[in-house]
Image (tube, coloured by chain):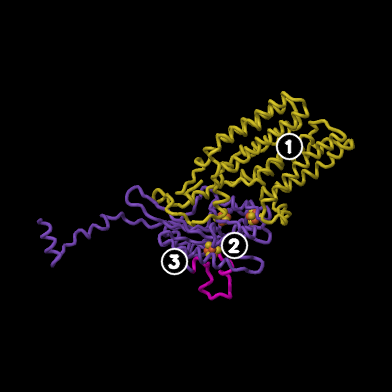
Amino acid sequence: MHPAPSVILFTVLSGLGFGFLALLGLGALPVSGWGAFTCWGLGYALAVAGLLASTFHLGHPERAWRAFSQWRSSWLSREGVSAVLTLLVLAPMALSDWLDLGFGRWIGVLGAGLCAVTVLSTAMIYTQLRSVPRWNHWLTPVTFLCFAATGAAILAVRLPWAYGLCAVLALVLLAGWRVGDGAFARAGQTIGSATGLDRLGRAEIFEPAHTAGNYLLREMIYVVGRRHVAKLRVIALVFACILPVALLAALPVHLASVLATAAHLLGAFAARWLFFAEAEHVVGLYYGKR
Amino acid sequence: MTTLPQTTGKKLGLVIDLDTCVGCQACVTACKGWNDQDQGRVKGLSDQDPYGAAPSGTFLNRVHSYQVTPETGPAQIVTFPRSCLHCEDAPCVTVCPTGASFKRAEDGIVLVNEDACIGCGLCAWACPYGAREMDAAQGVMKKCTLCVDRIYNDHLPEEDREPACVRTCPTGARHFGDFADPDSAVSRLSADRGGYALMPDLKTKPVNRYLPPRKKGAAQAAPLAPLLEIRASGFAGWLDRVLGKI
Ligand code: SF4
Ligand code: SF4
Ligand code: SF4
């Protein structure tokens, strides 16, 4: 699949944003006054920036409001609805922390639950697709949720939680790659089943259906850069999980927060780029490409 | 609404006969030609750089060609038209966030309301068959309409009220009809010839059926062998005998 920068930015930033908002909602980072304003503002900024980035790849961003209508059937719609709902529900909690209004923590807990639903919905957009076997696995939502939780714990310097979550994220990433590498083969679709010509014998491409490129080849059959998969996996692991632990352990809190989060984000971008670039769509079978 | 109808009154779709398809691409051209007409706010199928170095365009139907090698015997070329299968459990419809993609309850045709489409592309990701292409100029999703603007069109002569690709196919390899009716021509054709669905494991329940190429007995001998048997006569025969003796 084509790794569109806007979608990578969106999923990574909004994941971190909603993770951090959940942490603030739960009251896991005691904040008050202008400190609270800054923290909540940062959470909102990340979440909103991510959502805005997601509209950049639309053909008609001005119609984006329509995407709130089909929550009964569509995960993409559910994601939009839960994102907006989360931001609304958490607003009084943010105000309360900032201005010391003393609202009940239950609002924040409810909002944290909605944060999880939002991140889950984002992941389900990909997980639901049988046409992309690598994504069609429960490890996809687990990975997205782990990224959100880990990023938030690093940003808020919640120790030792951040250490534990980094370790869990590393294991989940490794498991995801392990399982994902065999997913296409396990799904069992071949050029023979795609065309039904397996009834006759072994099918191969004779000549391409069209000599020019098209949307399918550009969007679904993205093969550029898979050469560097091994290197990128190491980069993702080191930056998203290992380096943050070292930085958090070695540096004073504020510096650690900034540098460890920056490292983690870099790793998260690499992992998300791989998430798209490595995913193979079954339509590639018609073209003899994956 | 992007929830799917429980059942559809009719199940309109195509039978594509891989035995008679010769890969002439006439259906590709006819489909593009018919659907490239601007109709009010719905625009045709755009092309990018059509006469330049890197042409690319939006098509609703494409014809592939494959080489199939059986266990024994020589390989065979199969040309393979690919368009929307108007699936009963169309994943392209349920993923759509805006309700632009829908399946009609009356006849099962899967369509896109281009006025509501935000061009997110998720439906094309969900389709396993590559039946949807985003129009790069208009930013909306395009797909086979089963020529809904022909099949019910009273302004067309009766014989033209079928999809453009079906109407144009010079070998009659594409057939249009109602699969909900077990006695329709398409249902019987599919039953007689072992019509099959593409990638049924993906649980999309395609309506369209493909007819496999008929098994042709393996050629008994090399096709040029009989030519070796020809005995020359007259002057050529004399020359043959003389040269044979030298
Ligand atoms: S072939 Fe693809 S576009 Fe057509 S109904 Fe099935 S899933 Fe949808
Ligand atoms: S591209 Fe259009 S039709 Fe397809 S899922 Fe998005 S809004 Fe729906
Ligand atoms: S039915 Fe119409 S829109 Fe669909 S492939 Fe045939 S000509 Fe194209």
List the single residue furthest toward the front. B53
Picture quarter with ligand 1: bottom right
Closer to the camera: disc 1 or disc 3? 1
Query: Which amino acid lies under the numbered mark 2 shown in the image of this protein?
Result: Ser
Q: Residue at x 88, y 35 (%)?
A: A102
Tell me the subunit letter for badge 3: B
Span of residues in magenta: B146-167
Q: Earlier in the sequence, mark 2 or mark 3?
A: 2
For the residue marked with disc 3, what is the amino acid? Gly
Horizontal arrangement in the rendering, residue B116 relative to residue A34 (left or right): left
Mark 1: secondary structure:
helix
- Residue B6 shows in the view: yes
Q: Callout 3: 10 Å neighbours few (<14), some, many (20+)?
A: some
Query: How far across and how far down the image is residue B20, in percent?
Result: 41, 62
Judged from the image, the secondary structure of the residue bearing numbered disc 3 is: loop
Labels 1, 3: one chain: no
Residue A19: mark in rendering? 1
When the figure is inspected, residue A82 is found, relative to residue A169, above or below; the finding is below
Q: Are marks 1 and 2 on the same chain?
A: no
Q: Which residue is mark 2?
A: B46
For label 2, count other residues whose C-alpha is less than 10 Å away and answer few (under 14), some (14-19) or many (20+): some
Query: Residue B49 location, x and y as percent?
Result: 57, 60
Display colour for chain B: purple
Determine the colour of chain A: yellow
Q: Name the residue that disc number 3 marks.
A: B172
How far apart are the two marked residues, 1 and 2, measured between alpha carbons?
A: 42 Å
